[in-house]
Amino acid sequence: MRYTTFGRRSGLRVSEYALGTGNFGTQWASGTDAGDARAIFDRYAEAGGTFLDTAGMYQAGESETILGELLAADRDHFVVSTKYGASDAAQPHVSRTGSGRKNLLASVEASLRRLRTEYVDLLWVHFPDGVTPIDEIVRGMDDLVRSGKVHHVALSNYPAWQVSAAATLADLRGWSPIVGIQTEYSLIERSAERELLPMAEGLGLAVNLWSPLSGGLLTGKYRTGGEGRATDPSRFVTLESTDQRTAVIDAILTIADETGATAAQVSMAWLRERGTRSAAALIPIIGPRTLPQLDDYLAALDVTLTDKQYAHLDEVSAIDLGVPHGINAAIRGNLLGGDPSRFVEPLTPIV
């Protein structure tokens, strides 16, 4: 397991995989009990993992409760991130949802109790609620940082323009900086390349990547009728519903045959290589429900793709970046005096 700082806006040191604990608990339609959660946690820690991702809403709070028990022996060794915004109750109440200050403070206090800790290393706003002013959110999180209950703050599932506004506001007001974003990203879902990833690179934000295997689709198991999200009508799923997705999975399975790795390992190896080519810290959140699933993720750390294999996966999964990126690329040579090769872009953007 390698380590990195959580972007250029913090000195927070994290492992290259974050362990997602949304499966820790049995309050939802799927999950794992406390005993199996401990086995997964211990194996992840033995492999060098230190970065833990949870949320108040996961398993109606049970994820944080289980994690608190697991952390009791060595809390300070781990980096704990949690999220607020969505309710941790089976039946949400209007006063205990959303991004406003009232729910922010109440949610963090509840998370600290369940996690059995005096602080969280990283606090996320889980989703934009569409009504809370961004300055109320950023100021409220700054107050928590100043109190010592939170060390760093970040935004999950926010569009790029709102993240940029929040980061700029925090800088101008001298509040605790926004240090990262969380977004879905995988060989199946690369929409973040339009705005979110370039923004993160430019602003120095870390990027946590959720659903790196697209809910199991990239393992190829659903082609053979394997159980999982695609066979559970109660869960949000991504299906092999387009010609491009079929082509992506075909390419993954071909390279798996060439390398002797599993499809999941090939998919994660591409993501890891993608991270080395980015100026932003790209950190996948792995969410195993069983030990074999975790072992598959860990084995991917030893899989290296050739340049040809990486390029093939990159090409077959590429998306149309849309407006204005297409027209900008078309006229860039003209804007740079007819020969763009004369200009060398810095690896780290100037901000």
Image: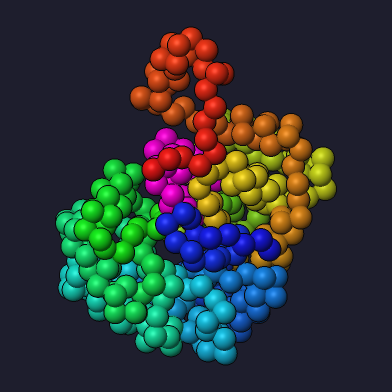
Residue placed most toward the observer, 324 or 66: 324
Residue 185 lies in the magenta-colored region = yes
In the picture, the quarter occupied by the C terminus is: top left
Q: Is residue 170 visible?
A: yes
Whole-percent x and y of residue 278? 55, 42
Looking at the image, is 337 positioned above or below residue 65? Answer: above
Whole-percent x and y of residue 237? 48, 51
**How many circles with numbers are drawn on the protein?**
0
Which residues are drawn in magenta? 184-208
Q: Is residue 197 visible?
A: no
Residue shown at 24% from the left, 76% from the top:
105
Q: Among all residues in the image, which is located at the extreme bottom? A: 73
Residue placed most toward the observer, 12 or 25: 12
The image quadrant of residue 134 is: bottom left
Whole-percent x and y of residue 92? 25, 72
Residue shown at 61% from the left, 81% from the top:
38
Model colouring? rainbow
Residue 168 lies in the magenta-colored region = no
The image quadrant of residue 310 is: top right
In the picture, the quarter occupied by the N terminus is: bottom right
Residue shown at 58% from the left, 34% from the top:
317
Looking at the image, is 305 positioned above or below residue 67? Answer: above
Whole-percent x and y of residue 76? 52, 82
Along the horizontal axis of the image, is 132 left or right of 119? Answer: left
Residue placed most toward the observer, 343 or 221: 343
Looking at the image, is 18 positioned above or below residue 189? Answer: below
Along the horizontal axis of the image, is 14 left or right of 29? Answer: right
Residue placed most toward the observer, 258 or 223: 258
